[in-house]
Image (tube, rainbow, N blue to C red):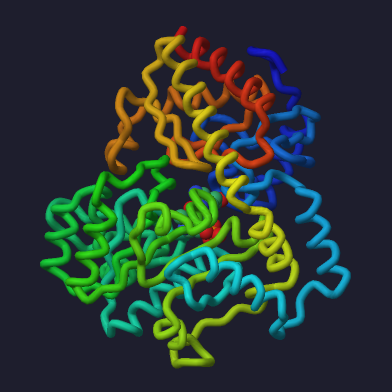
Amino acid sequence: MGAGAQLRDAKSTELYARAVQRLPGGVNSPVRAMRAIGRDPIFVERAEGAEIVDVDGNRYVDYVCSWGPLIHGHAHPEIVDAVIAAARRGTSYGAPTEAEVDLADEVSRRIPSVEMLRMTSSGTEASMSAIRLARAATGRTKLLKFAGAYHGHLDGLLAEAGSGLATAGIPASPGVPDTATQQTVIVPWNDGEAVARACAEHEFAAILAEPYPANMGLVPPVEGFLDLLRNKATDNGALLVFDEVITGFRVGPGGAQERLGVMPDLTVMGKVIGGGLPAAAYGGSRTLMDRIAPAGDVYQAGTLSGNPLAVAAGLATLRLLDDTAYTRLAHTTEALAGGLREAAAHADVPVSITSVPGLLTVFFAESAPRDYEGAKACDLDGYGAWCRALLASGVYPPPSQFEAWFPSLAHTHEHLERTLEAAAAAFHEVAA
Ligand code: KE4
């Protein structure tokens, strides 16, 4: 679709009217509702490679890619074939399989700090379980997390920073009891002094961080910040837990910890590990992981944890990720980021774009935020208007300023050309 084209939306509109009668907000996860960019959701009918087609036949270059799992794009033939072959042997046994051991081997080979892992069905479950293990291993309960970081919707982490010097978290959602968030201390990302103060005041079970936060938009750590977290966790007697649900297997073969050379005690993984099917995991040293039942006394379980279909998709996904793939993904990301910078500059729209291989965010702000307060100060309406214009021109961006774009190995030069043409027109539209 050319710039300014109108989307056909009759079927999506009809479906949305039905959906809101049966699903809260018409969706099964909030961000999909597109409320953050001021429009109703688009219902998808099918997808292949870097493209999705909605129920009205509109085609888009997709930069959500299921929020990260689809590093090879939609319906990659080898991944689909692996899932079909697995399904023909049965969809779930509730018993161990060789493929689960193979997947654990593949992960351990890639993620330096993961000697052993346990699979779950979602990143939330993996975060929750890693926290329980950290609390068991240290005999402590308090957690340190960063404002704007997201680790899943578990009670203890749906917490906001208290007012003023109060360091205990307050519930970020109705239904979350104070007792759940009182053990959570929240400090600003990239604020070494705040981390030092918190560690002087509290004995933590864990310091929990996305090494490249991508849930406030992509806000990379400032030089040395992750080393500081490593040192402060060690000095405090806390475990350092890296949530690599987004960065794992994406920013490089060994995730952010390999790229930045900072080793956590526990790693939370998800998304790419399941190749688009429900799978996540948490892992670390054998000493720590052998505390998990039934090897140890820390209970954690899951009916579909490590299920054959998700493991088949995950194995096929990881086995396709060789050095050439990472080089290509890095090149695609940088070409996209550079082109978007040029398009914004040409339209005189103030944006700042952050990027690491496989991730980028277009912040509607003069300078890149270094923390959540900075991200919240962006021109959210401007981002929303720009996204609506992109959708009308056949590009599907993440429908929130506080998310990242997920380029994939299926995005070709032609996709980038279409994207940058639409982005240029959309920047001129919002600049007018
Ligand atoms: P899930 O429970 O949604 O599988 O994973 C939670 C999670 C944990 N850690 C990080 C760093 C995450 O980004 C996520 C979930 N990511 C969001 C998008 N930023 C998923 C999209 C959604 O919530 O619908």
Please indicate whether residue 354 sits to the left or right of residue 121 in the image: left
Viewer-nearest residue: 374 or 113: 113
Can residue 50 be seen here? yes
Relative image position of residue 403 (x, y in whole percent): 47, 41
User: Where is residue 8, by image quadrant?
Assistant: top right
Please tell me which residue is depicted at 18% across the width and 60% down the height of the picture: 167
Relative image position of residue 425 (x, y in whole percent): 57, 13
User: Which quadrant holds the N terminus?
Assistant: top right
Please tell me which residue is depicted at 28% across the width and 36% down the height of the picture: 374
* Depicted 88 relative to depicted 220: above or below: below
Of all residues, the one furthest to the right in this rendering is 88
Of all residues, the one furthest to the top in this rendering is 432
Relative image position of residue 134 (x, y in whole percent): 35, 77
Please indicate whether residue 142 sits to the left or right of residue 266 in the image: left
Viewer-nearest residue: 170 or 326: 326
Relative image position of residue 41 (x, y in whole percent): 63, 37
Can residue 276 be seen here? no
Please indicate whether residue 352 sits to the left or right of residue 326 in the image: left
User: Where is residue 241, by image quadrant?
Assistant: bottom left
Please tell me which residue is depicted at 23% across the width and 54% down the height of the picture: 187
Please tell me which residue is depicted at 13% across the width and 53% down the height of the picture: 193
Figure label count: 0
Please indicate whether residue 229 sits to the left or right of residue 264 in the image: left
Viewer-nearest residue: 258 or 430: 258
